[in-house]
Amino acid sequence: MEAIIMNDRVTSDQELIRQFIAGDHYSLEILVKRHERKVFSYILLIVKDKHLAEDIFQDAFIKVINTLRAGSYNEEGKFLPWVMRIAHNLVIDYFRKSKRMQVVDNNPEYDLFETLKVFDETIEDKIVIEQIHQDVRNLIEYLPEEQKQVLKMRHYQDLSFKEIADKTEVSINTALGRMRYALINLRKMIQEKEIILTR
């Protein structure tokens, strides 16, 4: 974690956050200056437009301020990764709103993995995609075992539903049903975790 010297002592991000919450607005200014280059560079790398990057950067820190003031910040010792995540989400929001990403929101059973394939074709910067894929992989582990098994066979082993049915010794309809519920449950978890893909 980067730190800054104030009054002959090192002031951590967490100390500055506590000071800001206590009413010291200068502490926030120090935090912003400390991390602005990394955050702004990250945004600019993806959107490739300086003015747009500036807007997203400002929106990111407005969200930071609002979260801190609301007392909702709980990323102990991880301020920069948290800010980068906010910036990452705002960038994805921008792409979605500008229709540079195609996302199906109106069907609770839409195939999340087909959406990710569209993302792969649309965005050159793989860091964003890798984060989304990792978020989804992590959530898959929380699915019921039978649903998780079918989903992994289908999307990570590229098996047909007939092959899945044979391997799991169930009917094709049962395999399809498990897949359907896996996608429904996965979407619910994505919404609960506020992963940007379906916001």
Image (cartoon, helix red, strand yellow):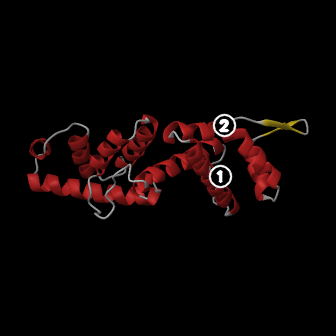
The local secondary structure at tag 1 comes to: helix
Q: From the viewer's perspective, is 22 left or right of 53?
A: right
**Residue 148 drawn above or below residue 46:** below
Residue 55, image x and y in percent? 60, 51
Residue at 31 percent of width and 64 percent of height:
106
Residue at 28 percent of width and 55 percent of height:
183
- How far, Cα to Cα, is label 1 from label 2? 13 Å
Question: Which of the numbered marks, if any, corresponds to residue 37?
Answer: 2
Question: Which of the numbered marks, if any, corresponds to residue 61?
Answer: 1
Residue at 19 percent of width and 38 percent of height:
158
Q: Amino acid at mark 2?
A: Arg
Which quadrant of the rendered structure holds the N terminus?
top right
Between 121 and 66, which is closer to the camera in this rendering?
Answer: 121
Q: Earlier in the sequence, mark 1 or mark 2?
A: 2
Pointer 1 and pointer 2: residues touching (CB < 8 Å)? no
Q: Amino acid at mark 1?
A: Phe
